[in-house]
Image: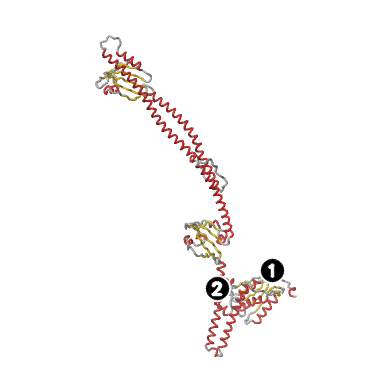
Amino acid sequence: MQKVSFFKSIHVKLVLIYVLLIVIALQIIGIYFSKELEDSLKGNFQDSILQRMELVQYSIREEMLKESNETNSTSTTTPESGIDAILREFSTDDINEIRVIDRRNRILATSDRDNQSMVGQRSNDDIVRTAMSVEALQDNIALDKQTMPMQRVWVLAAPITDTVGPNSEVLGAIYIESNIEKVYEQMSEINRIFAAGIAVSLAITIILGILVARTITRPISDMRKQAQAMSKGNFSRKVRVYGTDEIGQLAIAFNHLTNRLQESQSTTEAERRKLASVLSNMTDGVIATDRKGKIILINEPALSLLHDTRESTLNRPIASVLGLDQEYSFEDLIHMKESVSLDFSTSDAPYILRANFSVIQKETGFVNGLITVLHDITEQEKIDMERREFVANVSHELRTPLTTMRSYLEALADGAWRDENIAPTFLNVTQTETERMIRLVNDLLQLSKMDSQEYELNFEFVEFNKFFTHIIDRFEMSKSKNVEFLRLLPETSYFVDVDADKLTQVMDNIISNSLKYSPDGGNIRFGVTVHENMLRVMISDDGMGIPKENVGRIFDRFYRVDRARARSMGGSGLGLAIAREMIEAHGGRIWAESEEGVGTTVFFTLPFELDGAGDWE
């Protein structure tokens, strides 16, 4: 599992959210506090200035009215000196300057000791003229350019009237510059104190946020580590429960889930082992696919049947692996009710499989995949084919003589029996065909007994050279063709433990075939040699030979290279098949070698002994 980066962790996110909320709350409180504090300080400062201004205004008005009433007085005190006294009395640290201007805009007095030179000069302040013209208080906040750095001052101008009321007459104006910068300095100091408090609060908030976040993230981190361990198959680790809150309840539920998963995994693993054991010990091949038709499971018997490897079959479409992609799609295989034959036969050997398909479905009917079971039916198909061929051959072999017999018997029934020249011939043919059918039935009965192992061999020790010579002599005396017998027999005596009657039948069949197919003037060679502790017997002729591709089948039942000629010579096609069964029953092997147009050689082997005297006695 990928490690979570620091800035993406929920721990940092919780702390950041917590801190941001506190910062936003403090900012809102600070803005509101600063605004209200500023308004309060400014209001108190302005109220204080206005109150003193009213007193100054009253005192100066009284002084100016006194001047007007005592114009002819002999008093030594001038009006300016009285106003100066009033201004000095009301001059404080928060008032930079107080000026008194008469109605003609002439400056009568100023409280600034450094600006006494302006007394008697005209006032150029617009605020003063405006106040006298509108007979109302005027004020604004301006920058004092004489200070460095420039400070803010609150400038007020109020008219001085002789009486209070609508018919009053303007006597002059009073101009005041108050040092409101001190208010802003107080605000700045308070804001610095407040900012320091916010910084301390944020530091405490961050520490508390980290501690609070850990109470949330620690159980989550433990659950994350447990999930990682579970993904690796470790279910023994448990999540620590830190409390009974929602996260604690989640940890308890997570531990319960871990236990259930552990039990489920154990059950699944046990079932998997059972399934693996069943699949590995099955003789049939089993293939499972996903819902898209790709192979997800295949057992060893299936790989063996398909002659393929697990790496090359997994994740491949099943139709492609089975060689059905040209005929069927995966959807066709899902709906396949009957088994499908897979023919992998080559020119050398047949190889046929049968595939049965079963759909894996959920209860809702959703298709999850397909199960395919493979069976090797090569031998079964071969047996069925041989059975069909055997029935066909038997039917054909019996039908031919029966048809011939019926024709001749019908002719005899129609009156041919009265003809002394024709009747004996017809009866002779009927007798010949009857004997042929009897031989065929006897051969079939003999093969049937040999197939069912319902026969017994009467073994006895025989000196093979004498036994073989006796059989050759019998055929040599009764042969009807001009064929020379060549004997290549050893002088050493070899004793074989055989059923003499059965072995005689084998040799009669082989030698009879050699005589049938040998031309006049030809040779039949007889030989005996020893190979690999076995006695090898050879019977060779100069007949027409057998094509190379047919040599291996001459020992099959009813097989004839030239059917028409073999049937005309009276053969049933079972002689060599019986010979093979007999030789194999004696522990030997029989085969043929032939060249077309040159001749055929039949070999068979028998176990032997060099000394069989005790048995002869």
Q: Nearer the viewer, residue 492 or 614?
A: 614
Answer with left or right where residue 420 lies relative to residue 51. Answer: right
Quadrant of the image containing the C terminus: bottom right
Q: Is residue 27 visible?
A: yes
Residue 298: which quarter of the image? bottom right
Residue 259, position in %: x, y? Answer: 55, 48
**What label does residue 389 carry, if any?**
2
Please, what is the three-letter code of the amino acid marked with disc 1? Asn
**What label does residue 58 carry, if any?**
none
Residue at label 1? 533
Answer with left or right where residue 451 lies relative to residue 75. Answer: right
Residue 586, position in %: x, y? Answer: 66, 72
Q: Secondary structure at mark 2?
A: helix
Q: Residue at x 47, y 60 (%)?
A: 331
Mark 2 to mark 1: distance in Å?
Answer: 38 Å
Crowd tier of the residue under label 2, counting other residues whose Cα lies within 10 Å: few below 14, some 14–19, many 20 or above = some
Q: Nearer the viewer, residue 18 or 286?
A: 18
Please, what is the three-letter code of the amino acid marked with disc 2? Glu
Q: Nearer the viewer, residue 452 or 515?
A: 452
Residue 39, position in %: x, y? Answer: 37, 27
